[in-house]
Amino acid sequence: MDNWNVCLINDSFPPTIDGVATAVRNYAQIITAEHGSAAVVTPYYPDVDDSGFPFPVYRYPSMQMSKKLGYRAGIPFSPELMGKMREERFDIIHSHCPISSTLLARSLRDQLQLPLVLTYHTKFDVDIANAVRGKLIQGELIRLLVRNISACDEVWTVSRGAGENLRSMGFQGDYVVMPNGVDFPKGRVSEEEIAASTRDYDLPAGVPVLLFVGRMMWYKGIRIILDALKKLDEEGRSFRMVFIGGGGDREEILSYAEGLRMGEKLIFIDPIRDRDRIRAWYCRGDLFLFPSTFDTNGLVVREAAACGLASVLVRGSCAAEDVADGETGFLIEENAASMAETLRRLMDQPELVLRVGDQAREGLYLSWEDAVDNAWDGYGAVIDNYRRGLYQRQRNGPDDAFHNLGALMDWLNRLDMRKTAVEYRNRSWSFGDILSLIWRSKDPRDPLSRQRTDRFL
């Protein structure tokens, strides 16, 4: 088997916990253990310790974004990083985010002469709409995003729905569906482990436990859950609804939930990073509620399925792909009335819920080992196509800019301009600064341009 070295780039990575960060961590761990070697390239976080990972982690400059987003944004301009990447002798670059990670990846590709594959995990048009007001600006950002994605040699998506989302934004290229896996083994944990993880919460025996795990954002369908449960509460139904996660809308969600006055029936728990404890919660639940039309893969649905926990999902959503209603899950319309009607019916049929959970475990489960095996085969095809010259790209203005930026970072590193590198790393960057740097890198009159730098070499 080929012993390739893979460069994995993403905007999020521990200490940030989300589905894509989990995917990148699993890619790196399994590649390192079973296939070849890998390194992760991700934005800098203060006081982070990466020494516990069995693979190298390279951090590049970043800046704190708004609390609403909850992320640090990478600034993909680092002479030091360019030098380290050249020393690693990678065979392929795999970006997991189409924004700053792919900006960096395109510069690295140009300088290192490697193929670049992108996995599209998230509906970025929704993220853009939530972050930016004004249709004109949203449209321009989406066009920039699509151009960035289209510049990659190959595009993978985590589901068919993710691919169709790309199409809806104007992407015209081909894509390959490459699903993510689950890092839980198939099956339940012991009753002792369940009790140890959940003992601090009011979960009476015989009372249904409904579960949500994920970012606490309204676009995850959380209002549908709360409004549906209010209907059941008014009917006198007993239940416990457990929300596990953090996110930018958490305080608003807590306030909204308090106004519904359901008291002890609603339980909110901060994000749990211990995977064994999360697995125990999945095993304690009776139904997993995930009425999100935002998610492109619904990894948490597969995690629940691994533990034999059936999910309630919105019909036609990406999370519901491959789910058969009444066989491997339960499908609803995207509203609280449909959710309430389904929960009312299922609470009276616990045997059906158990049977569908068992069938979900057998029908929906995909281990991360199998998922990365599939990706490894995909890497082989991409590397072969690249070496055969099948990824001929039309160079245009933006590509010229990325070529010059990559060259600029490489030259600064090769010239051992440590003082300049430190200034770039520590500088507080604005969007205007970045645009200025891109433009200057194309201007032959500027001392940082290629022509002037060539004179020093």
Image: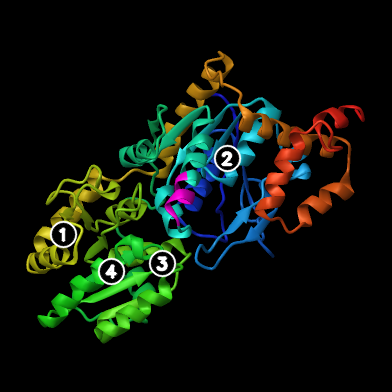
Where residue 379 appears, as percent x and y from the top left, is 50, 28
The residues bearing labels 2 and 3 have C-alpha atoms spaced at a distance of 34 Å
Q: Is mark 3 on a helix, strand or loop?
A: helix
Sequence-wise first label, 4 or 2 = 2
What predominant SS class does the magenta segment belong to? helix
Label 3 neighbour load within 10 Å: few <14, some 14-19, many 20+: some
Looking at the image, is 162 positioned above or below residue 131?
A: above
Looking at the rendered structure, the secondary structure element under dot 4 is helix
User: Marks 2 and 3: which is nearer the front?
Assistant: 2
- As drawn, the label of residue 223 is 4
Q: Position of residue 403 (x, y in %)?
A: 69, 30
Nearer-N-terminus badge (3/4): 4
Compare marks 2 and 3 and give the one earlier in the sequence: 2
Q: Mark 2 points at which residue?
A: 102
Can the viewer see residue 214? yes
- Which residue in the protein does label 3 denote? 277
